[in-house]
Image (cartoon, rainbow, N blue to C red):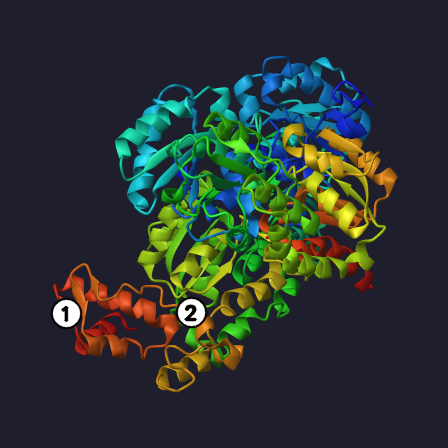
Amino acid sequence: MSGATARTVTETGCHDLPVLYERGQHEVFCGLTSIVWLHRKIQDAFFLVVGSRTCAHLIQSAAGVMIFAEPRFATAIMEERDLAGLADMNDELDRVVGRLVERRPDIKLLFLVGSCPSEVIKLDLGRAAERLSRAFAPSVRVLHYSGSGIETTFTQGEDGCLAALVATMSSAAAEAAPSLLVVGALADVVEDQFRRLFDALGIERVGFLPPRRADQLAGIGPKTRYLLAQPFLADTAKALERRGARPIEAPFPLGAEGTTAWLEAAAAAFGVPAERVDSVTEAGRERAARAVERHRPALGGKRIFFFPDSQLEIPLARFLVRELGMEAVEVGTPYLHRAQLERELALLPPGTALSEGQDVERQLDRCQAAKPDIVVCGLGLANPLEAAGMTTKWSIELLFTPIQGYDQAGDLAELFARPLDRRTRLEV
Amino acid sequence: MQLTVWTYEGPPHVGAMRVATGMQGLHYVLHAPQGDTYADLLFTMIERRDHRPPVTYTTFQARDLGKDTAELFKDATRAAFERFQPEAMIVGASCTAELIQDDPGGLARALQLPIPVVPLELPSYQKKENWGAAETFYQLVRAFAGPLAPPPGSPARAPNPEPSVNLLGPTALGFRHRDDVREIEGLLRELGVRVNVTAPMGARPRDLQRLPEADANVVLYPEIADVAARWLERTFKQQTIRTVPIGVGATQDFVREVAALFGLDPAPVLATARSRLPWYSRSVDSTYLTGKRVFVFGDATHAIAAARVAAKELGFTVVGLGTYGREFARDVRAAAAALGLEALISDDYLEVEQAIAAAHPDLVLGTQMERHIAKRLGVPCAVISAPVHVQDFPARYAPHMGFEGANVLFDTFVHPLMMGLEEHLLQMFREDFEFHHEAAPSHLGPAAKAAAAPPDPAPEVAVVDTVVWTAEAERELKKIPFFVRHRARNNTERFAKERGVGRITVETLYDAKSHFGR
């Protein structure tokens, strides 16, 4: 086995957790994939990938069963004549966008999404977005970000999209009352639950990014405190801070413990007394504990192995280890954003093996050797691992399912319990 | 630049993956950015394969572009060779790697691996999946069988004592390839014809060296095997069997073509009533199928075959025929002309949708894309061609080729339609309390009520381009069963507009019915 493609370094990270850095074949989606949920979340936005046939094929394959009759995404496929300079790429793009806007007058916000080929040929989508914004103002606003595989994996596409949105948020007046901005796409049902909880805590001005409609984008300023609901939003966080917003440090709202700590952090930032937090969250905490407890017999003591995928791996491992008594054999993540994950890492048991990046062949070797009870992995690996006798949970479902908050904690545990349950039922 | 909502074919390297994954002992090293590994899930999820495709991706990132992506490719190739120990390799680039021009073929050659390495040039910005599969298969066949080519002017090859053929074209992720191959192998066996090599599916690279030993090549899927078969024909003077045995008539033609080639008697195989399709089609309860309007779209091979079956074996009227595959557009145009139609050659999903809507079919025979179009238009649909979805890999044996394939086609084409008597009853008792326009289908039970009732696809009814429905006509329209109501509405509006009638009355409704009625 040649070691040249697999640069492997083990070092001790913060909180004394060993981190294995690897560089080899990455079996991960690119950032374009996040369009699959983003285009459902922002209901008047359209995502136009400027890329190749591969990009179009990727999104439709990743969307899989989620095919909609006419989705709010499409690909402007670059062709030979564009690359050979026979056609001016910018004229072509203008023509394609013109056709699109004409077909879909319901579109208020258009994202031009960069891809690997558009990045490699250095097509300037920023300038294109400005030009097209002027052309279609005021009915359509055009933004851009990159979802290319050479720069982003999977959920980083959402990071790019939200960072682009931050730039368009209106500036809140300096004398405006303090406001809370919850950042990261959540299922509508989860968003509504959180909204009710913040309301009960007495935090009045709460915005969500991304909003459900483009015109519901909150204002931003020095009195804005932002609270990340997803762990993969490093660029968005930077963009928010550039606009003057300040972070609220917290673990992520997965499981009862994570949700409570997340709400407590917000409450503390807004001066809500601890007793009020206790009384507001009591019912939720109890419901979550009950729901999670049901899955403890199935999951307690079981060993879990995470392949890198969504960057949710570390908060998920924390939930499964601390609330369900599982043992994390290896927690792989495509990127380890320490700033965003500091509170999470502190909650993991000492010695938890983390890995960042990937050499999929070596990781499969480690996985086979470790013989975990359940493996969290992408769609390309799941069936082959099942055929090799392993129990798997495909990770993309963790993005397409409401899992955050008290009332989803049981559902989240169940996602891991179900594959194990299935194994015990089947006699074939 | 082409605006694409859904795409019928993947990029050409996915075609190469289909060949590599179908074969044994072959490994594909693909120079590709991070993210292109999505293609693995086509095979592991859609086809439910229990192994990863034999593909190593270099998954380069932006930070590698400034350094040495060529070195990355060489490292990945060497590591893949050492880990997987393949008999042979194919190497190439995906769309992004094509732009950085690292020359995977040259880099792999420089490694001097002790196995054959076949370089692939698959222009991603011009070509698509089927072309990529055909080119990959052709390059592999040339690489392995090429050295065995007889020198020019050699005498014609002597026929084998036992007639033998190669079955060419089946790949991984192919539409019913797995079952078609079993069906056709069985048919050939009965005829007394031996299958020498089936490729790419199931073949090892070294098996390709045995291709020249067969007397003839059966081109099961021209989209994938035609180029290779033509080369084999030229190089080894092998015969080519081109009839694609989909449907009863085509299967009989296929049997006759093979039998004639080898001087065998086709009668015993043809005599037995092999397929239930002819009798099922002639049995009286199929009368209601007569003249049903069918729109057919798919890859060229399956579309042409389905149109023939629909018209000649089920008595439908084909009202549209088309393909997304430009390579075989000429064949589809000819088939369409024979049916008095102009073929639709397009890979633009929106254009196909428009054509289907305009043709007002009773049934769509298409791909997974057309299934969605049909769902939107409220028209029944059966899938007859790639692009595939997980449902196109059924657990049961379900070929589309051969006599059993014809049985499958009968069921596939007929089951989406309302059964004959059911249709009549709905026509007669349209105001029946269970059949009325807001009732859910009765088989869903009372719990399903309103919620399950299919919404009328065109709610914005009052004014349509200056055509107005009177309240009375609107009420009458609602007495028409929901599954044909949308078409009745459209037909009536079209009828009214064409005649400059601005106000649709009950009379207009029935005038239109008599105009469009058969």
In which chain is the residue bearing label 2? B
Amino acid type, mark 1: Arg
Residue A205 can be seen in this image: yes
Quarter assignment of residue A80: top left
B288 relative to A29 in the view: left or right: left
Q: CA distance from mark 1 to mark 2?
A: 27 Å
Task: Locate residue B398, reporting x and y percent.
Answer: 63, 60
Amino acid type, mark 2: Pro
Q: Decide which of A334, A4 is in the foreground and name it.
A: A334
Kindly identify which numbered label has been placed on residue A11. Answer: none
* Mark 1 secondary-structure assignment: strand
Task: Locate residue A352, reporting x and y percent.
Answer: 81, 36
In which chain is the residue bearing label 1? B
What residue is rendered at 42% in x and 76% in y? B288
What residue is rendered at 36% in x and 20% in y? A86
Pick whichever of labels 1 and 2 is earlier in the sequence: 2
